Image: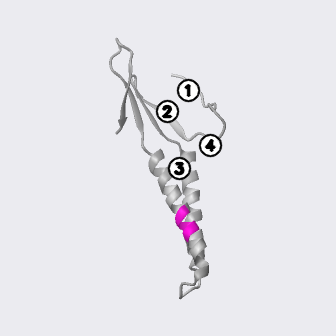
Amino acid sequence: MQTSWQRMHEGGATFQTTKVIKVHKDKYKVMMSIKAFLFYLVILIAGLAILASAFKGTVEIPVSIIIPFLLGLFFIWASLYMFYHSNESMTFERLSEFLNIPLWDGTE
């Protein structure tokens, strides 16, 4: 099986976000790549850093930390959302060698 990683349309990621793994002769899995995982991890760390900097050295909660607090929460939510939806592995399996029909049985 050959896979091409050219874009179908403009936009999207400039790096490989999924990888195809051959489990055995008639079964393939599509899983998240390491590059995508590291990208989501960087966004999560940035969100945690923004959130930590909002509360740095404050005992009281002033109004001026609302925007950094919300921005940090947004980064954390976005990274966890992207990780959750990218981490669902898909499995493709043939019904039989005779029919040669690919079957998608969804996530595991």
Task: Say which of 91 and 73 sits in front.
Answer: 73
Q: Which residue carries the number 4 mark? A: 13
* 3D distance between C-alphas at marks 3 and 4: 13 Å
Residue at disc 1, secondary structure:
loop
- Where is 56 relative to 3, above or below? below
* Cα–Cα span, label 3 and label 1: 21 Å
Indicate which disc, 1 or 4, sits on the residue closer to the N terminus: 1
Tag in front: 3 or 4 = 4
Q: Amino acid at mark 2?
A: Val
Residue contact between numbered discs 4 and 2, judged by CB atoms under 8 Å: no
Q: Residues within 10 Å of mark 1 (few under 14, many from 20)?
A: few
Kind of residue indicated by mark 4? Ala
Examine the structure image and report whether residue 73 is included in the region drawn in magenta: yes
Where is 71 relative to 54, above or below? above
Which numbered circle lies on residue 37? 3
Q: Measured along the vertical axis of the image, is residue 55 above or below residue 31? A: below
